Image (tube, rainbow, N blue to C red):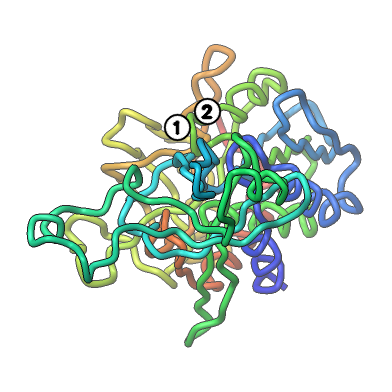
Amino acid sequence: MVKELLRKLSNAHGISGSEGSVAELIRGEVAPYVDEISEDPMGNLIAVKKGDDFSILLAAHMDEIGLMVKFVDDRGYVRFVTVGGWFDATLYAQRVVLHGEKGPVYGVIGGKPPHVMTEEDRKKPVKVDDMFIDVGAISPEEVGDLGIEVGTPITLDREFRELANNRVTGKCFDNRAGCAMLIRTLQQVESPHTIYAVFTVQEEVGLKGAKTAAYRLNPDCAIATDTTIPGDHPGIERKDVSLLMGEGPVITVIDNNGRGLIANRKMIAWLRTTAAARGIKVQLEVGKGGTTDATSIHLERGGIPSTTLSIATRYIHSPVEVLDIVDIEGGVALLVEALKTEPKF
């Protein structure tokens, strides 16, 4: 069931460069359904379903945005840096998990209380440089005794919850939703072609894992599965973002105003034709900001025809992302059917 799979993935922890526990969870889900499974030197988890000489790469990044310990002051407060793209204000007053050598340590992100802010303070956005993590310690030695040191990764202490109308909320749906879509596809698909399912690392800090995996595997074409922004809630207009939650998975035409991916038109046609034939609702995206693993993949080996299949997700890069389960189910159905055929180049 997609919802329970997403629950497990969202509740797992793994910032860029520390994706190991997420990889182990995914390995357990897909190993019975593939012919080979391995980890490359970057940490990408590569699952292979063997077929003919035509190969298709499916990529979903495992990493989530997070934080990392930079310094512990003389009173035991932890200073940190962000890993990946945060809007600073979303971090203030959040609970966090520090993944230390002795196990998880819980803390809270603190800052100057509003009660003692000056009028000038109140006019300024809260910045990460002014925040700290309080783990209850009173000295750097106590923090060290907890197993926390410079370089310790940190994630948000949030759990998956169900909302109304088959919608759910949790942390890091970007991109555990894409991982869920790819896992369920592997569990169901019967394809004549060779399928490389790559759960990539370090997407949030430069699309790094996808780049090395694409070079190594040299597929004939590729689809990245990820999330994208809908235009269906206050603060955003449909003229800026036309996508809606619950109206099907999203096929990328271009993203980041074309500075990221300009998708291969034959890849788009392949997915659209399959969707039409099977009565699967899809949406098309021309995006102004953000990009995916497909950007790295399509530039490797002289050019790999690529696109992205995304799930419209509200409040991306926050601790409270929201999506509609029906969109993931539609994405799985589309991939399972498309992989029975191949794009016509």
State the image quarter where residue 315 is shown.
bottom left
From where the camera sits, is residue 26 visible? yes
Where residue 340 appears, as percent x and y from the top left, is 71, 48
Above or below 130: residue 89: below
Q: Secondary structure at mark 2?
A: loop
Rendered image: mark on residue 277: none
Where residue 331 appears, as percent x and y from the top left, is 57, 59
Q: Are marks 2 and 1 in contact (CB under 8 Å)?
A: yes
The quadrant the C terminus occupies is: top right
Badge count: 2
Amino acid marked by disc 2 = Pro
The crowding category of the residue bearing disc 2, from other C-alpha atoms within 10 Å (few below 14, some 14 to 19, many at least 20), is: many
In the picture of the structure, the residue carrying the numbered disc 2 is 305
Q: Secondary structure at mark 1?
A: loop
Q: Residue at x 41, y 38 (%)?
A: 291
Q: Earlier in the sequence, mark 2 or mark 1?
A: 1
Does 45 sit left or right of 324 as displayed? right
Q: In terms of depth relative to the viewer, which is nearer, 132 or 76? A: 76
From where the camera sits, is residue 277 visible? no
In the picture of the structure, the residue carrying the numbered disc 1 is 264
The crowding category of the residue bearing disc 1, from other C-alpha atoms within 10 Å (few below 14, some 14 to 19, many at least 20), is: some
Q: Residue at x 57, y 49 (%)?
A: 139
Does 336 sit left or right of 133 as displayed? right
Q: Residue at x 45, y 67 (%)?
A: 320
Q: Residue at x 30, y 56 (%)?
A: 89
